[in-house]
Image (cartoon, helix red, strand yellow):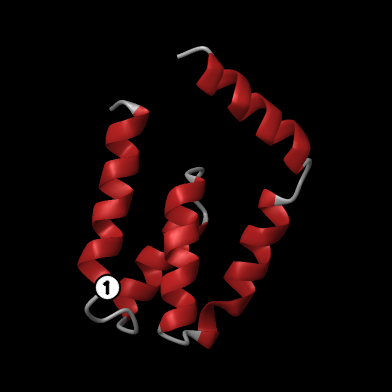
Amino acid sequence: MAKSRKLEATLAKLEVIRADPSCEMALDTLRQVLDSPYSVAVAQAAKLVQTAELYALTPDLVTTFERLMVDPVKKRSRLSGQISNR
């Protein structure tokens, strides 16, 4: 599956749980998305966690933030290179 399809599938999962983000299935999905490599999906999941006030996911948010902040300049420059190659 191409990356864009995987990203689309991940975003679709978020849309499904948006109606009831506090159910157990939704919490599991949010944890999976927060651990995904797609920053767009991670940002949407984090926003949903904030909006729904899902405090149980605070440790997951902290872990995600720490993961994303490991050498962010290097990751950002790598992304810029990928975009310019298109």
Quadrant for the N terminus in the image: top left
Callout 1 amino acid: Arg
Q: Residue at x 30, y 62 (%)?
A: 14
User: Residue 66: where, in percent of width, then height?
Assistant: 72, 58
Name which residue lies at 21% across and 66% down: 16
Q: Quadrant of residue 78?
A: top right
For residue 2, which quarter of the picture?
top left
**How many numbered markers are drawn?**
1
Left or right, 55 with reference to 32 = right
Instruction: Sort mark 1 into few (<14), some (14-19) or many (20+) by Cα contacts within 10 Å.
Output: some
Question: Outermost residue toward the top?
Answer: 85
Q: Position of residue 49 (x, y in %)?
A: 46, 76
Residue, x 47% and y 44% (percent of image)?
A: 38
At numbered mark 1, what does the secondary structure look like: helix, strand or loop? Answer: loop
Q: Is residue 9 above or below residue 4?
A: below
Q: Is residue 47 above or below residue 3?
A: below
Position of the C terminus, as image quadrant, is top left
Q: Is residue 22 above or below residue 4?
A: below
Residue at left offset 69%, top offset 28%: 77
Q: Which residue is mark 1?
A: 18
Q: Identify whether 12 is placed above or below 60.
A: above
Q: Nearer the viewer, residue 1 or 81?
A: 81
Spot occupied by residue 76 in the image (x, y as percentages of width and height) = 67, 35
Q: Position of residue 81 (x, y in %)?
A: 61, 19
